[in-house]
Amino acid sequence: MPAARPRGRPPKNKPMSANAFPQGFLWGAATAAYQVEGAVHEDGRGETIWDRFCRVPGAIHGGDTGDVACDHYHRWRDDVENMRDLRLSAYRFSTAWARVFPQGKGKPNRKGLDFYEALVDGLLAAGIQPALTLYHWDLPQALQDAGGWTSRDTASWFAEYASCLYTHLGDRVKTWMTLNEPWVSAFAGHWQGVHAPGLKDFGTAVQAAHVLLHAHALAVSAFRELGARDARIGIALDLHQVYPWSDGVSDQEAARRCDGHVNRWFLDPVFKGTYPKDMLDLYARHHAAPHEHTGDAEALAAHPMDFLGVNYYFPQRVYASDAGGLLGYESGRLEDRQRTEMDWEVHPDGLYDLLLRLKGDYGDPAIFITENGAAFKDQRVEKGQVQDDDRIGYLDGHIRAARRAIERGVKLQGYFLWSLLDNFEWSFGYRQRFGITHVDFATQARTWKKSAGWYQRVIATNGGALA
Ligand code: FCB
């Protein structure tokens, strides 16, 4: 069954208004394999670090797992139909490495490849461009057992997996992303311990970040050899606009460290091939500098990306604090601000500031917003439809901020809303709902929230409906 939605004809495309988005701007929605697919034991899929982490007592809210999730593995046709009804021009999804290589390497699993080929063909038949992320956190467990992201071999296996997908799907997929949010893989997974694989050591996390960046470089390099000429590749980074809590020097410096840790530690390598010196010095003082090999920096610099993917949700407001450990800062909260159910501050200007900063500091790159969205309680239901006006408000504010950035010359080429569906929100389980399509996890019924109809109108008018 496709998603239930109000009857009536979808709005016709209106002519572009003066303040509309550029022609060809991609209007998309995003998901990730482990969060939606389910079917974790089917068709030869191997175990991943998230399958394992979900079994750790207390790791996931309510003991939830991604075993079934949105059952997208079986319902993808309906989900594509839903996307067509939404009039999406693009869909960002990730491929599960362990479906394609159950042990992370070796012989590819034909059934895993078949699934993604069918999905891509279904999208194209529906007039939707596939935008494929190669790694959204679900490392094959077999590779974790061999050292995971702290081992350079993992980067080599990643490049082989990437090459396999370029070869099988490169004729049809024109937008590729290597990694989703390597900060989260590295630091939430190896330092904070709140994500798989659940480790808690800063130096290990820095090393994991380095191997992830190395994997990115190898995958971009392989793409230049195997990818189609008319295709593009980038990375999706979780970026925060960082504001100092006060004008005081120590808070300004704290903000610079936060920016160095969450933003520049990834932006500088992928754009310039170098780590930011201030952070390298700081990590080294705490015996946590990465083990760099000769040629790592050159490999990054030698294979520039075609675009930057920006995942933006909320800003950081930072003050100096000894309680902040080696980074020496903590994040404060402005009490008068609206916050989402994740307790994230709603601040669309942060997106605007961030986009302008990226343009200025990183050579005016082509940018896609690869994730942006909000979890709210979604309790107000009328005539069977979630009346999620707060989500509409969030999205509206951020898309307007994106438009202002375009007006200031930022080369923004698309916007992917997070998320198409309510889904498995990592350590929060199914409690946090980000979807514009409501999912009843008992029946798997999909129903449009009010925001879905709103987004459909925004797309149909190329952003004109915001004005
Ligand atoms: C991002 C993740 C995505 C989703 C959103 C809410 O950090 O990339 O999978 O969990 O947050």
Image (cartoon, grey):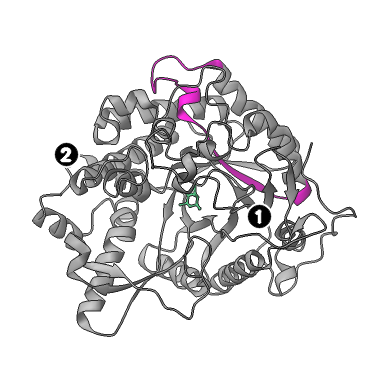
Asked which quadrant contains residue 247, the reply is bottom left
Q: Position of residue 352 (x, y in %)?
A: 50, 71
Which quadrant is the C terminus positioned in?
A: bottom right
Magenta stretch, residue numbers: 85-110
Side of 239 relative to 147 (left or right): right
Side of 392 relative to 385 (left or right): left
- Residues 358 and 223: in front is 358
Side of 230 relative to 387 (left or right): left
Look at the numbered discs 1 and 2 and tell me whether their residues touch, using CB distance below 8 Å: no
* Residue behind label 1 places its C-beta within 8 angstroms of ligand 1: no
- Residues 284 and 393: in front is 393
| Residue designated by label 1 | 27
Q: Position of residue 2 (x, y in %)?
A: 78, 40
Of the residues under marks 1 and 2, which one precedes in the sequence?
1
Quick check: 131 above or below 108?
below
Asked which quadrant contains residue 124, the reply is top right
Q: Is residue 196 magenta?
A: no
- Residues 442 and 172: in front is 442
Task: Say which element carries label 2.
Answer: loop
* Residue behind label 2 places its C-beta within 8 angstroms of ligand 1: no
Q: Is residue 90 magenta?
A: yes
Query: How far apart are the alpha carbons under marks 1 and 2?
Result: 41 Å
Look at label 2 and name its amino acid.
Thr
Asked which quadrant contains residue 295, the reply is top left
Task: Say which element carries label 1.
Answer: strand
Image point 46% across, 29% down: which residue? 97
Q: Residues within 10 Å of mark 2 (few under 14, many from 20)?
A: few
Look at label 1 and name its amino acid.
Trp
Q: Position of residue 429 (x, y in %)?
A: 50, 45
Q: How many marks?
A: 2
| Residue designated by label 2 | 294
